[in-house]
Amino acid sequence: MNETLHIAIVFNLPLIITIWMNGFFEEVEGILHYLDQQNRRIHVVDIREQINII
């Protein structure tokens, strides 16, 4: 999975990430902005240019 995320950062490719939040699946679609491996966080910029921290 890390390789897919790194390729998305390098080539600025859009992603759809599905996460489990509050008992439901939620999809976050956008471009990967930052990958913090130490704190296990992903920053995704969505279509409305808002940063979602997963």
Image: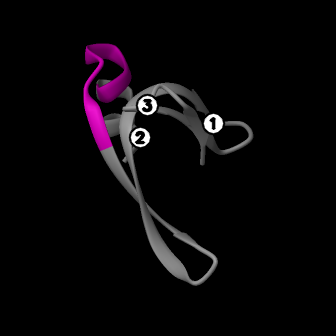
Residue at the front extreme of this rendering: 48
- Is the residue 29 above or below the residue 19 in the image? above
Q: Secondary structure at mark 3?
A: loop
Work out whether mark 3 precedes mark 2 in sequence or the reverse, and give the earlier one.
2
- Identify whether 50 is placed above or below 17: above
**Image position, residue 38 (x, y; %):** 72, 36
Residue 9 versus residue 35 in the image, above or below: above
Q: Residue lying farthest right?
A: 39
Mark 2 in CB contact with mark 1 (< 8 angstroms):
yes
- Of the residues tagged 3 and 2, which is closer to the observer? 3
Circle 3 is placed at which residue position?
48
Residue at point 27% right, 32% down?
Answer: 14
Residue 2 x/y as whole percent: 41, 40
Q: Is residue 5 left or right of residue 34?
A: left
Question: Looking at the image, which residue sits at the far bottom?
Answer: 23
SS of the residue under disc 2: helix
Q: Position of residue 3 (x, y in %)?
A: 34, 36
Residue 10: within the magenta? yes
- In the drawing, what numbered circle is on residue 2? 2
Secondary element at tag 1: loop
Q: Which residues are magenta?
A: 8-15
Q: Residues within 10 Å of mark 3 (few under 14, many from 20)?
A: few
Q: Quadrant of residue 42?
A: top right
Residue 37 - label: 1
- Residue sitting at 36 percent across and 36 percent down? 30
Marks 2 and 1 sit apart, C-alpha to C-alpha, by 9 Å
Q: Are circles 1 and 3 on residues that touch, CB within 8 Å?
A: no
Please give the name of the residue rendered at 43% of the width and 31% of the height, measured from the top-left corner. 48
| Disc on the earlier residue, 1 or 3 | 1
Nearer to us: label 1 or label 3: 3
Marks 1 and 3, how far apart in space?
25 Å
Amino acid type assigned to the residue bearing label 3 in the image: Arg
